[in-house]
Image (cartoon, helix red, strand yellow):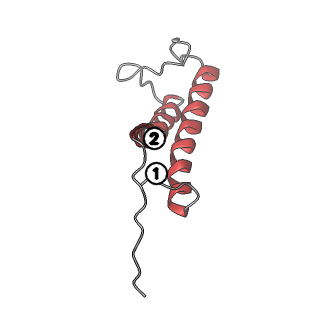
Amino acid sequence: MATNPTRRPSPPMVKLLLWTLLWLLMGFWAIVGPLFAVLAAASFFIDISPVVSLTLPAGKEAQTPGQKAVFLALSALLGLVGIGFFWLRRRGHLKDPL
């Protein structure tokens, strides 16, 4: 009995491109989200406006404590989404298209 290993067909280029873009976006969020969250938390105690400006998605700069809290929450959420993506991938719940 000869066994011929069957090779999986290569994924379509569009699917591979979309997976790569998703992977890069989640990697960006996993790095930048916690970094922005730390900056937002530090902005409650020290003035970081000469170094960096915390801009909300609406385009306004976060200056009041309420706006800084919103920026902190959004940054933490984006970081959790990015880190959660890689955690799920590592545990095998998300499969690579290859």
Identify the residue under disc 2. Answer: 15
Classed neighbour count for the residue bearing mark 1: other residues with Cα under 10 Å, few (<14), some (14–19), many (≥20): few
Hey, which quadrant is residue 67 in on the image? top right
Does dot 1 land on a helix, a strand or a loop?
Answer: loop
Quarter of the image for the N terminus: give it: bottom left
Which residue shows up at 46% across the image and 51% down it?
A: 97
Q: Is residue 91 shown above or below 42?
A: below
Query: Count the marks: how many?
Result: 2
Kind of residue at badge 1: Pro
**Relative image position of residue 81 (x, y in whole percent):** 56, 42
Left or right relative to 54: residue 51: left
Q: Nearer the viewer, residue 85 or 40?
A: 85
Determine the residue positioned at 56% across, 38% down: 76
Report which residue position mark 1 lands on: 97
Farthest right residue? 66
Could you say where residue 15 lies in the image, as x and y percent from the top left?
45, 41
Which structural element holds mark 2? Answer: helix
